[in-house]
Amino acid sequence: MQTERIYNLSYVNADLSGFLHHLEKSYINQRVGAYIATVNPEIGYAAAKDSSYCDVLSAADFILPDGIGVVMMSKLTNNRLKSRIAGYDVFVNLLKIANDKQKRIFLYGAKKEVNQAVVDRISSEYPGISIVGYSDGYAQDKEAVAKRIAKAKPDMVFVALGYPHQERFIYEYKHLFPQAIAIGLGGSFDVFSGTVKRAPNFLIRLNLEWLYRLLTNPSRWKRMLNIPKYAFTVLKEEKVQKQSYYPEQVKERSKQIDA
Ligand code: UDP
C-alpha cells in the first residue's frame, strides 16, 4: 500500500474500497493478521506530543486517515493523501466480509449495554459471523481480556476503547492473536448500536462530520481544540523542514551548474 507521511506518521494513501480490497486479498484470505490504527487529528496531535504513543501507532501495519483534518493537512503540506478512510466504514465493511466468509470475531469495548447491543445487532443481521467472544471496555484486567481473545481464536478483533487505550491494547497483546485483523475503532460501537447518531450523509459528504459531533455533543469542544493545535504543529514542522532543506537544495543545484 502506498503511504503519505504527515508529521511523524505514515498514512495509507488509498480510498476505502482500495484499502479493503488489499486487506481482503493479502491478509484476510491468507489468514495473515494485521494491526490497523485509525488516526484523526486529535490522535495525530497526541502522537506528536507523546513519543511513546507515536511508537505504538507506528507499529501498526496500516494507519488510516480517519478524519478530514488529516487529509486537509496533507493538502496544505503538499502531500497527496487521496481520501479519508473512516474507521466506522471499515468496521461495517469488515462485518460484511466476515459474514460472507463465515469469519470469527471478538468485540471488545464500550459500555456493557452498548457492547451487548452491538452483539445483538450483529447476531441478527450477519448470520454468517461467529461471535466468539465479547467484553465491555471497562473491565479492569486487560490482560485477562487479551487471554480470552487468544483462546477464542478470532479472525477479527474489534477494539473500541477510545485512544490511546485501544492502540496500546493491540500493541501490547497482538502477539497473542497473530492471525487476527485487530483494529482500534473509537466510538464506533456507540454509533453501530444506535446509542450515538453518526452525522447525516450530506454532512459527511461536505466534510462537516466534526461540526455535527461538536453540535450534538458540545462537551467535546475542549477535545476539539486539539484539531487546530495539530494543524499548527504540522505546519510549523513543515516550515522548519523547508528552511533546513533549502540551503542543501541550493548547494546541489550549484554543484550541478558547476559540473
Ligand atoms: N471506552 C471504553 N473504555 C474506557 C473508556 C472508553 O470502552 O475505559 C469506550 C467508550 O464507551 C466509547 C469509546 O470507548 O464507546 C470511545 O469513544 P470516543 O467517542 O471517545 O472515541 P472517538 O471516536 O472520539 O475516538
Image (cartoon, rainbow, N blue to C red):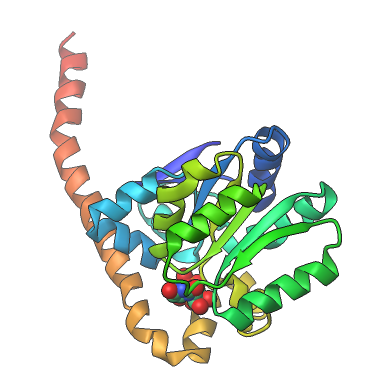
Q: Quick one: quadrant of the C terminus?
A: top left
Position of residue 80 measured from the top left corner of the image (x, y, whole percent): 47, 46
Of 241 and 131, nearer the camera is 131
Q: Is residue 107 left or right of residue 79?
A: right
Q: Residue at x 77, y 57 (%)?
A: 130
Q: Residue at x 30, y 63 (%)?
A: 46
Q: Is residue 57 left or right of residue 67?
A: left
Q: Quick one: quadrant of the N terminus?
A: top right
Position of residue 77 measured from the top left corner of the image (x, y, whole percent): 35, 51
State the residue lying farthest toward the top.
259
Position of residue 249 measured from the top left corner of the image (x, y, whole percent): 20, 29
Q: Is residue 78 left or right of residue 197?
A: left
Position of residue 98 measured from the top left corner of the image (x, y, whole percent): 76, 52
Determine the image quadrant of residue 235. Answer: bottom left
Q: Residue at x 40, y 43 (%)?
A: 59
User: Vertically, is 227 above or below 17?
Assistant: below
Q: Is residue 6 visible?
A: no
Of 171 and 197, nearer the camera is 171
Of 123 and 17, nearer the camera is 123
Say how many tags the image has.
0
Q: Residue at x 21, y 44 (%)?
A: 242
Determine the image quadrant of residue 135. Answer: bottom right
Of 148 and 113, nearer the camera is 148
User: Vertically, is 230 above or below 117?
Assistant: above
Q: Is residue 223 visible?
A: yes
User: Vertically, is 243 above or below 137?
Assistant: above
